[in-house]
Amino acid sequence: MNFFFASCKDLIFPAHCLECERQLPTWKLPLFCVDCLARVPFVRSPYCTCCGLPFQSGHDHLCGQCIARSYSFKLARAALHYNDPVVSLISNLKFKGKLTSLSTLVTLAISSSGFRDLSEPDIIIPVPLHAQRLRNRGFNQAATIAHAIFKKKKRKIAPTLLVRDRATIAQTGLNGKERRKNLFGAFSVKQPKMVKGKRILLVDDVFTTGSTVNECAKTLMKCDAEQVEIFTLSRAT
């Protein structure tokens, strides 16, 4: 019976590639044709053992930035490079609220090597938006991503535990130093006792310089979290 309904769906509402819009034989995820799927840029080893910065060759080791400065998180991992066709998928989700690409992004994310590097978390926290931006956008893409990836761990997801108290200016166009200054003291923890001694996983859409997730991690570590790890759908390099 399920096969019958699936066949009817494929016939009446045929699937199309999310990138080139070529018609696909079925709705099987990820929704890419063979050619476009081959272009999907997974983040693969070798990469920095701390921040996950990809290297062109060699083996996994600390990058120069992680040697020079210490992050507040234990490690950060991303599933995909922030290049096409990933850019358009995330932009459509984040700024246009199009959920068509979400299942495909989740399928790619959980099959990535970065996802397998993560420890088992006690609490999963989406990077929060300020209330004003949340009202304007209508949803928090990080929370949407977290709930989609961790369906079986939904009881661990705490979308309101970490709060963005200050409406910072957009990070786009700022360098690393400006981003850190822009975010300084922007976050707080509602119930610090819930964080104490816990392994936290922060979830977001894109890791750019790491300033946002590091400020979040710093805030959580000040509340005596045991450790903080980061997982993002993509990594800008």
Image: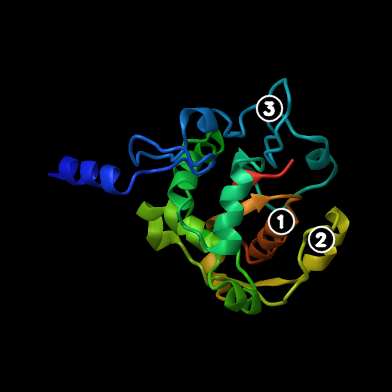
User: Which residue shows up at 70% across the image and 42% down it?
Assistant: 51
Disc sitting over residue 137 in the figure: none
Front one among 110 and 69: 110
- Report which residue position mark 3 lands on: 60
Q: Residues within 10 Å of mark 1 (few under 14, many from 20)?
A: many
Q: In the picture, residue 38 is in which quadrant?
A: top right
Task: Find out whether the residues at labels 1 and 2 contact each other: C-beta distance under 8 Å.
Answer: yes
Three-letter amino acid code of the residue under disc 3:
Asp
Disc sitting over residue 214 in the figure: 1
Residue 204 appears in view: no
Q: In the picture, residue 151 is in which quadrant?
A: bottom left
Is residue 125 positioned above or below 133 on the image?
A: above
Is residue 171 positioned above or below 163 on the image?
A: above
Residue 101 pos. (x, y %): 48, 50
Sequence-wise, which precedes: disc 2 or disc 3? 3
Residue 52 pos. (x, y %): 67, 39
CA–CA distance in space, label 1 to label 3 = 21 Å
